[in-house]
Image: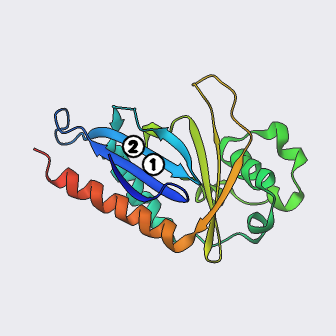
Amino acid sequence: MMTLGDPNTFAMGLEVDWSSSRKPWMYGKLCMWICGRLLGSADYDDATLSDALVSLNHEIDKLQTPSDRSLAIASTEIAFFSIEGSIYGLKHFQHLLPPSFQTLRVDEKANYQLRIGDAFDDCKIYCVPVGDICRLIYSTRTERRAPWSYPIECKVSKSAFDRLIIEARDLLATWYSSLP
C-alpha cells in the first residue's frame, strides 16, 4: 500500500487491485490516518477507487471553502453536531445549539463534509478551515447499525491537507489512466 503524507498527522493509504480493475471500475484499498488514528480500512479489498477519484475531484473544488467564524471558534462537539444536524436533519439536538449555529444553510455546511468513497461508510469526517489550519472533526462506528463515537478533533496544516488531497487525486488519476 502506498502511503501519502504522515500517518501521525494526516495521511492516505492507497492500493489498486490490478487483477480486478477494468475501466470504468477501479478497485483496491483506501484508508486515511488522522493524528495517528486509522479510518477506513487498510484491509478493505473492495474500495471503489474510481468513485474515490470522482469524490476527490469534488473535494478539490471545495478546498477554497471559506471559514465560517462561528464554526471556527466552536467547540468540537458544537461544530460537529451543527454540521451533522444541518446535513442530515437531526432535529432532536438542534435545540441544544446556539442560535448562530442554526442559521447556516445546509449547502454551506455540506461544504465541510469530507466524502472520499465507500471505504469510509463508517466514518463521518468534517473539515473546517480556520486560517492556515484545518479542523478535522470525525466520528466512527464499528458496524452499520452501531452507534457513532463521540466526535474527535485533530488540527492539521491547511496547506498539507490541500496538498495531500491533490496528490491522492493525481495518483488515482494516473492509475486509472493505465487501466485496460
Please report whichever mark, 2 or 1, sits nearer to the chain's N-terminal start: 2
Residue topped by disc 1? 116
Q: Quick one: 80 or 1, which is closer to the camera?
A: 1
Depth check, mark 2 against mark 1: the one in front is 2
Q: Position of residue 155 (x, y in %)?
A: 65, 63
Where disc 2 sits, the SS reads strand
Would you say 155 lies left or right of 4 here? Answer: right
Could you tell me which residue is drawn at 66 percent across and 47 percent down?
Answer: 87
Q: Quick one: 110 or 30, which is closer to the camera?
A: 30
Q: Quick one: 48 or 96, which is closer to the camera?
A: 48
Could you tell me which residue is drawn at 30 percent across and 44 percent down?
Answer: 15
Q: Position of residue 167 (x, y in %)?
A: 35, 64
Identify which amino acid the numbered label 1 is placed on: Ile
Could you tell me which residue is drawn at 71 percent across and 69 percent down?
Answer: 68
* Quarter of the image where the C terminus is located: top left
User: Is disc 2 in contact with disc 1, using a CB cutoff of under 8 Å?
Assistant: yes
Q: Is residue 51 visible?
A: yes
Give the class, few, some or many, for how many residues have Cα within 10 Å of label 1's Cα (few <14, many ≥20). Answer: many
Q: Is residue 115 visible?
A: no
Where disc 1 sits, the SS reads loop
Give the class, few, some or many, for how many residues have Cα within 10 Å of label 2's Cα (few <14, many ≥20). Answer: many
Would you say 26 lies left or right of 4 here? Answer: left
Identify which amino acid the numbered label 2 is placed on: Leu
CA–CA distance between discs 2 and 1?
9 Å
Q: Position of residue 165 (x, y in %)?
A: 43, 62
Could you tell me which residue is drawn at 69 percent across and 54 percent down?
Answer: 153
Residue topped by disc 2? 30
How was this image coloured?
rainbow
